[in-house]
Amino acid sequence: MPDINDGERQADLDWLYGTNARPTPPPPVVAPRRIAPEPPAAPYEAPAAMPVVPAAPAAPAAPAAAAHRSATQADFDWLYRGDTAAQPATPVARPVEPPVTPAAAPIATPYMHPPVAPPRPPAPSAPAVVDDYSGYDYGYSEPDDTDYYEDEEPASAAPKAKKSTGSSRHKAARRTLTVILVILALIVSVAGYYLWRVTSTMCAVTNGEHCNAGSVISVINNVINGGNQNLVPLKTDANGRTNVLLLGTSDDRTDTGGGNWLTDSIIVVSLSQTDKNAFMISVPRDLWVKYPKTCSVGNQGKVNAAFMCNGAGDKATVAQLRSALTATIPTFEQITGLDIQYAADLNYAVLEALTNAVGGGIVVELYPSDPRGIYDVNTGLKLQPKSVRCPGESINPMECGLSTDLVMALSRARNSDGGYGLGGGNFSREQNQQAIIVGLLKQAKVNGIITNLAGVNTALQGIGDNLRSTLPADAIPTMLALGQEIPPTSFKSLDFVNAKPTLVTTAYMGDQSIVMPSGGLYNYSAIQRWIAKQMSADPAVLEGATIDVLNATGTPGKAATAASVLEGLGFTVGQVTNYTTKIAGTQVYDVTGTKPQTSAALAKQYGVKVTSGPPDSYKASSATDFVVIIGT
């Protein structure tokens, strides 16, 4: 027998024994048939009417569940198997509690047998089962390709798997292909967006030359592979170095402070592709210069207005900004004595984007002028030794780990509104900006940002229209390769503000406080010589010897001319004066005997043998290493 639930059994028994109206079975679920057509069914004969069951003595009816416990197997066979020959048995009366209040029992309605579907011929292996309750799961499992139930199985038995057909395999293949196509479409869309973003950014930050998808793909290929294949050589000067002028503006500021296009950060970066080193030279923003043309501020003024004077401004197009960069280069060539190949203008948004791209923090080495560290009222920046951010005890240098917010604050801080630790004012700020650049390079190498497309994309999101340059697009891979090859420790900072001997001084031009060369207004020769010496790869120049030049010809100007030649070679010249007597030919004297490279270089320069010790009738200063006497 099927194991039906108690609720269904109770309803059927109530109907069978006349206590309730006939229940309505759930409609049968007709499944597709795959068997041969059935023979014609036998004519239907309605069963005989059931006799009326007499009412029990006046008493409350016992619970239905108790009254039907004596139902026979024949009753269930008749009810569930459609056996018209069987008749329900009369239930056996059971003792009940004495009634509390006599009441007349209702008279049962005459029994009417429900219509029963014609019986189906039994299957060879099992009797036929009607489908009246085929919508429920009673624990049966349906065999393949039949509409008959097998023998009863436990309700927990797992249904048998159906055979896989060719149609289902084709559907599965089509679904798999659809998923693959969707994934490929997403990859192509993301790659296309990335390529478009990189291309548009490169077109914005470069001079527009070679700005196309091919150049971008070349950049990406070099970034991924980290190789130097097919790199376009950078332009160089006579010494094989590439010099880039970096101008920092605040055109992205949202306040009304003004001066957005003044270049308060000026750094010339000199790179060597062969020696794998770099020098960073900060130029004081208040240095007084002549402008190449007359503009709104006149034909001379502070160097930080040169870019604006040449056309930079809020209404300038990208092309006009590039033109202004190109026009500004000669001013800084005159100051530094360097042949500058490229220029770039960037604002604070670029610095923020780069700091985020390397992980949102960098480590910098600072040199505060106060033992307490650095505090700036305007930005709120406060860095102290032996603190969480600056754990060391030293302030020379004071090594600090800075988040993006602190990097931005440090790049602006100069104690303009009070504080301590930035005694040089704007000079201190320039030194700290160089320290930030070195910190970015170090962190970029640690994180592999230069060869990481995700990091490059993060940087590009912040760069956008915030950087303009005269670099061609095909030079970007070479720049990235140099960034990988030059160790951060090979980036050296050159600060001619604090150089010895003194190269610049402060003065007033009208009511403006300015910086000017120590040799006089617009005289940058000493600055140029100092830079050349610091950047020289000549070991003799690096020894830093001081050379006195004496004139023994009797013709004025001979010593000065010789001194200029030596300075041009990167040597440091001390005293330039006349010798007491005339001599024939040029003579070189090694006073200290401690600079062998310089001794060899001077011997080669003048084609003579160097004499040890000082010359007769001349008293050299304590700083003098060599004496050169120019004779007839």
Image (cartoon, grey):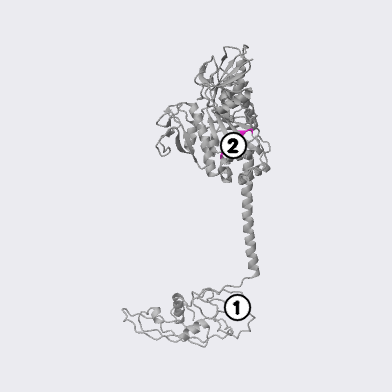
The percent position of residue 115, horizontal first and vertical second, equals 54, 81
Image height check: is 477 above or below 289? below
Q: Quadrant of the C terminus?
A: top right
Find the distance from the CA under tag 1 to the CA under tag 2: 83 Å
The percent position of residue 180, horizontal first and vertical second, equals 63, 57
Secondary structure beneath label 2: loop
Residue type pointed to by label 1: Thr
Horizontal side of 136 relative to 195 (left or right) equals: left
Residue 11 is drawn in which quadrant?
bottom left
Residue type pointed to by label 2: Lys
The percent position of residue 572, horizontal first and vertical second, equals 56, 23
Secondary structure beneath label 1: loop
Residue 269 is drawn in which quadrant?
top right
Residue 331 visible, this angle: no
| Residue of label 2 | 276
Does the magenta portion include 536? no
Q: Mark 2 or mark 1, which is nearer the start of the sequence?
A: 1
Front residue of this view, candidates 85 and 328: 328
Region rendered in magenta: 462-470
Crowd around label 1: few <14 · some 14–19 · many ≥20 (10 Å): few
User: Residue drawn 59% across and 45% down?
Assistant: 453
Horizontal side of 530 relative to 89 (left or right) equals: right
| Residue of label 1 | 146
Image height check: is 422 above or below 359? above
The mark tally for this picture is 2
Residue 125 visible, this angle: yes
